[in-house]
Every structure is written in C-alpha cells, then in structure tokens.
Image (cartoon, grey):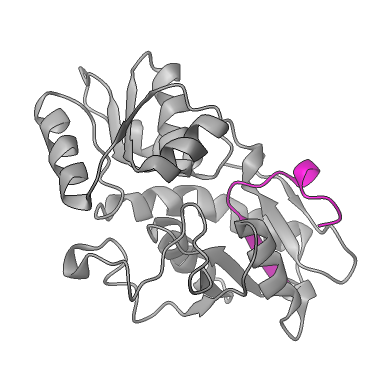
Amino acid sequence: MRGVFSLSRPRAGGPVVLWGGAQPSGSLKYLTFARYLAAMPPGSRGLVELSGASSALALDVLGRERGLPTVALTDATGEAYLRAHGFQGQVRQVGSMADMFHQAMTLERDGWCWPRQLTNRALVACVEAWASGLRAQVRERFPTVKRVVCGFGTGATLAGLTRVFTTGGFTVTGLQPAPGKPLPGWRTWEAQNLGAEDLFFEHQPRVPLATAAPAPDAVTALLDWARRQPHPEQVLVIAHNAREEDVAQA
C-alpha cells in the first residue's frame, strides 16, 4: 500500500507524524476495514459496529462505496461525535454494553456484517497489511525514526503496528487517555477491557502502555508525549484521525 500515507515532520527536531485524517473516512480505520471487508461474504445486508468514533465513520464510508447501510451502536456522546464528523448512517443510542452486543448480534443473525472490532483478532492482520508499507516509507523518508507512539483504542492498530515495526527494530508504545479525561476512540486497559475475549488480551503483556497528560484531543496528547521524549526527532506519531492542515503549528 505505497502512496497512501501522509507523512511529515511539522517542526525541525520534532516528531514525524502520520496524518491518518487524509484517508477517505478521516482515519486509518478506513485502511483496516477496507482490508477486512474485501473478504466479506456476498449478500450482506449492511454493516454494524459498536462505535461512536473512527470505526463507525470508516464503515459508513465503506458501506456507501458498496451500496450498504451502516448502523452505529453508541451512546449520546458518540452520536454527537459521529454527526459532527459527517456520519450518514443510522445511530442507535444504547444504554449498556450488553444491550449493544445484543442488538449487534440480532442484526448479525439477520444477515448484517459485524466486524466485532473489540474481540476480532483478524483485524490485527488487516492492520499489518498496510503497516508494512508504512514502515517502508518511514525508513526511506525518515531513517532516524526509531520509536512509534499510537493511541490505544480497540488495540488492533497498536497490535498490528507492534508486530510490523518491532521486527524492524523499532519500539512501539500505546498511549492511554489521562485519568478522567476521555478521548474519542481511546480507552484505558485496566478499566475498560473484556478479559480473555478482548482483542488486545494476548498482546497486553508485550506492548507497553503509557498514560497521556491531559489534552483537548488525541493528536495533542500524542504530540505532547512525543515532544517530552529524550529524542523527539526519533518518534513517529500515529495521528489516527488528524489532518496536518487542521493542526496549526503542530
């Protein structure tokens, strides 16, 4: 997947940034789910996911490309985020995680495609499919980079990047939100995991998770963390859903 990545070093001596917002849905989830849906059985009636952020937005765009409707199961905060970012599918506000799973399973039984992003380990391989091309471009254009930092959400992107980049000699860190300061699409492992069923469960012992300082948004949290490192110029920031033109003086 060469040529699909927007990479830059906004400040001399600062971190390199992968701008995921340049993707058609506004995040790197577009690449991951495009790979996943390529193997979707024919005849699916639509797409459904438990998401109030980037995953739902990616599935919405991919669904429209395929002529399929998309349903996002989320809460009021998630719905507000989705509508503010151009989501055109159906949003169902659900009061509990158990109810979300129940509604998704009902739609799945009715022929809808549910990627099960919280538990589906196949999504890690979907990330690996595009991460190898990213690693090649980083090595070619920014050979001084040795570290990667990525926000921690479902864990698929973080785990896939870890598999690809660590084999190339890089270190990879996942960043969790500051206590009491939630960020869309991010979570904390200790308080928000599904145990052994969780997609990230098997990776957690081997992937370091750090905690961000309080920040108004994800890209600010990531850039702040990177700039606090001893050698910020050696860090690649995975700005999952940010665009360079929207981050003034990044």
Residue 101's x, y, as percent? Answer: 17, 45
Residue 13 occupies quadrant: bottom right
Q: State whether residue 44 is above or below residue 14.
A: above
User: Is 19 on the left-hand or right-hand side of 241?
Assistant: right
Quadrant in the picture for residue 45:
top left
Is residue 4 in view from this perspective? no
Residue 201: say if magenta: no
Quadrant assignment for the C terminus: bottom right
Question: Does 86 sit above or below residue 101?
Answer: above
- The stretch in magenta equals 235-250
Q: In which quarter of the image is the N terminus?
A: top right
Residue drawn at x 51%, y 48% as measured from the top left: 130
Residue 203 x %, y %: 33, 72
Which percent across, then down, holds residue 59?
40, 32
Q: Quadrant of residue 154?
A: bottom left
**Residue 235 visible within the image:** yes
Q: Is residue 8 above or below residue 150?
A: above
Q: Residue at x 28, y 32 (%)?
A: 48
Of residues 138 and 58, the one drawn nearer to the viewer in this rendering: 58
| Residue positioned most to the bottom | 230
User: Quick check: is 237 in the magenta stretch?
Assistant: yes
Which of the pair 170/50 is nearer the observer? 50
Q: Where is residue 55 in the image (x, y as percent from the top left)?
A: 42, 41
